[in-house]
Image (cartoon, helix red, strand yellow):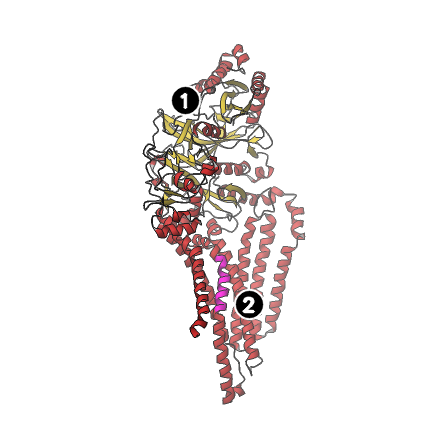
Amino acid sequence: MRNWKALPALIGAALLVLFVGYIALYFVFIDLFVDLWWFRSLQLGNYFWLRLLYRFFFSGGVTIAFFCIFFLHFWIASRYLGINTAEELILDTVKRKRIQKISEAFKNGSVKLFTPVSLILAIVIAIPFYNQWETAILYFFGRSSGVVDPVYGNDVSFYMLTLPLFQLIQKELLTTAGLLFLLVFFLYWAEHTFLPSQRQEYSRGAKIHLTILTGFVLLFVVWGFLLDRYSLLHIDSHEPVFFGPGFVDLRYHLPLIWVGIVTFVGASIFGIGYIFNRSKSSAKLTVVFFAVFLLSIGLRELRLIPELLDKFYVGPNPVKSQKQFMQYNIEATLDAYDLNKIHVVDYPITLDPVQDIKTWGNEKHFENIPVWDREFLDDSFHQLQGIRPYYTFPGVDEDRYFINGHLQQVNISGREVNIAQLPFEARNWENTHLRYTHGYGAVVTPAAQDAGKPLVWYLRDLNLYSSVGFSIAQPDIYYGTENYGYAITPNKLNVVGISTSDPSEGTPYNGEGGIDIGSIFRKALFAFYFKDEKIFFSTNISRDSKLLMRRNIVERINYLTPFLHLDKDAYLVLTKDRFYWIQDAYSLSNEYPVSHSTNENFQNGLTQFNYIRNSVKVVVDAFSGSVQYYISDPSDPLIQAYARAYPSVFKKLEEMPEELYKHIRYPRDMYYLQMKVYAKYHQNKPELFYEQAETWQFANEGKKEIKPYYMTIDFGTCNEREEFVLINPMTPINRDNLSMLGLARVEDDSCSNKYNPNITVYKFRKDVQVNGPAQIDALIDQDPRISEQFTLWDQGGSRVLRGRMIVLPMIGSMLYVQPIYLVSTTTRIPELTRVIVSIGNRVVMDTSIRESFKHLQDLFIQGNTATNESAGTDH
């Protein structure tokens, strides 16, 4: 009978154990096992354990430390210092034993109570540390940068690596000390109140204990005041003129902060002294210091004095009073955005471009001018080379390859898999995860093409035909930019008609990546992980099968290294062996002192920051999924801290394979951001900076901002060798004439093939008019023959679209090139129909840049009026 009565309790206990086990398995162990296997498949098992060790060592260590702090003080208060029995009761044996018995019960009960209370309080206090454990990594592994902030004289790495952790620790220690003081005071009060026959006065030990806790509270408050000084470095009240502290902040508020610190310390010292000696002088000094402290706080909050200083000194003398502080902001911002080494060249413009036209009148200069915009090529690739409904081209990248004896710019796009266009009934589990597992091959076209002719292909079709010698041993793309789910390959399915490395034989996947999933245990675990029972019950999964997951390269890199911020444009690189993705990654911080803050969208989302470095080049194998990290900016203190923390992850850029190294480039997002900041901060003298008379903006064309574009061309700096550069034109703010042309390169003037990113700004003289893209647009619109031709094309089921305008520096002139496309209203295949070329206020249109340039030669050199009549006609 007793066994039957215990049965419900046993069943309940068993169910509870099963429930707890299920929760632990589902939310902890499954993720742990899957992540471990996944990291090991990437040869990053040590990195996985190291991150786990850092996280739990730091989080656990902080929790234990706070537990010890709470428990120690509770234990002291309950066991030693709280009891203060009258002497006459101590002499009475019976009463003494009775008091001792009650005291022992109080002490033992307190320990049992305070152990879980201390643990709970420790966990609550330590929660912010659990979420910011990587802040501690930066602190412990960080080193100085060698750059000093101009206000306080600290190394800038202190603000990016150390200060965030100090602020977190100060806040939590102050909370801990305040809680301890209140709880220990309550404990002493309880001991004094509920234990019988206690003296009215607290024991000396209790007073010392409470005084020590008070001292800790005061100490952490003072530390908070000291850290509060650094908030002045991020004041934005002077914008849009400049960022950071100004005259009032550093000459009025900062001295008041120091007065507040000194007087608070004085009031604390004399206040503690008064508690012990009850001296009138201590009391008076405490009152005086505290009154001055309150006065300093009041003066900081009072707006009258700063407003008077602004009105009668700063306002009438803005440059004189703020000059030093504007210079702080200029220098800090240029350094934070890596703009302090820009090479500025005064570029003379000649009004007569005849000599430039003679010099440039050869084939070489026109072979790499890109007349196909990425946006238009994307549609062409989809229509002409998608071939099958489950293939797509997510984006087009620009790159350069050694073709036909010289460096040639091309457009390249990977043919990735996407089954969204298949019939609904075909988008089932087996097709999604076992059949349509990968893309195949790529297409490559030259950047420079003639209009009115079929698109020229350097690599095309599923047989990967190439007229220039491109060949790829493993053209399968299992990892890319599409929104991929998991794939299981090889498997037992007979995949028919889907391209693989050997279409005729259906060669199974033999890549190094992926997680072995042949065992029943692993299939069951992954079925739970993906909430998909088909993984477990499918008979098409063999013992050789591997599960490929996190196949989108952005998701893959973000999961591996969440502390890096990714460029929006990963690009595909073709090698003889296989395809690779190169992804530029950035180190960001919003803690750089006195630097202007900005917002920008990266792959991780919108981020606010005031410091950026292109610190890492990430290479992802499109076939195996392996991920390699190469440090491209060793001067960055953030990436150096991570490299010391995770030495097995990051490699030197020189260790990158040569066939990939020659394809690294200056990232477009980085350059765009730099130029957006430099548009204002190139005025590096406070007087000019305040005037803002030379502020730039990105050149506009048809109300559309011209973003930086890639060009491969010989600029005469590398012994007649072409360079792959980023170009962006800029105009004065609210004006259309050209002010500068910026070039971003990955080599310096030594042309040693060593990665050394740099920016050159060709600055035009103010006394010479240089046409901007909007003004060339106006010249095109004013040409009657071109306008007439556009009107004719815009009829009959087609419309004219103007491509991006290319601006190029010649020797002493500027060359403008704009492609013209025709797009049918029934199909989305754009056709490159004409190319417009302009030099020196002359505009011509023809089927190629070469032919248009010849007409310009006739116009300027021969002065042929007949050619002038036909310059705008349809050739």
Characterize the local packing of mark 2: few (<14), some (14-19) or many (20 or more) Cα atoms within 10 angstroms: some
Q: Which of marks 1 and 2 is in front?
A: 1
Amino acid type, mark 1: Lys
> In the rendering, at what x and y percent does residue 526 appear?
40, 50
The residue identified by callout 2 is 269
Relative side of 194 to 504, left or right: right
Tag shown at residue 364: 1
**Res 407 → quadrant:** top left
Amino acid type, mark 2: Ile
Q: What stretch is highlighted in magenta?
A: 116-129
Total numbered badges shown on the rendered structure: 2
Q: Which element type, helix, strand or loop, lies under badge 1?
A: helix
Tag shown at residue 105: none
The answer to whether residue 71 is seen in the rendering is yes
Q: Hey, which residue is sitting farthest front in the picture? A: 1
The answer to whether residue 80 is seen in the rendering is no
> In the rendering, at what x and y percent does residue 574 appear?
37, 33
Characterize the local packing of mark 1: few (<14), some (14-19) or many (20 or more) Cα atoms within 10 angstroms: few
**Res 393 → quadrant:** top left
> In the rendering, at what x and y percent does residue 395 appear?
46, 34
Predominant secondary structure in magenta?
A: helix
| CA separation in Å, label 1 and label 2 | 81 Å
Residue nearer the viewer, 532 or 458: 532
Residue 119 belongs to the span the image colors magenta? yes
| Dot placed on the residue nearer the N-terminal end, 1 or 2 | 2
Residue nearer the viewer, 445 or 81: 445
Image height check: is 217 above or below 847?
A: below
Residue 715 belongs to the span the image colors magenta? no
**Residue at horizontal 50 percent and vertical 20 percent from the top:** 833
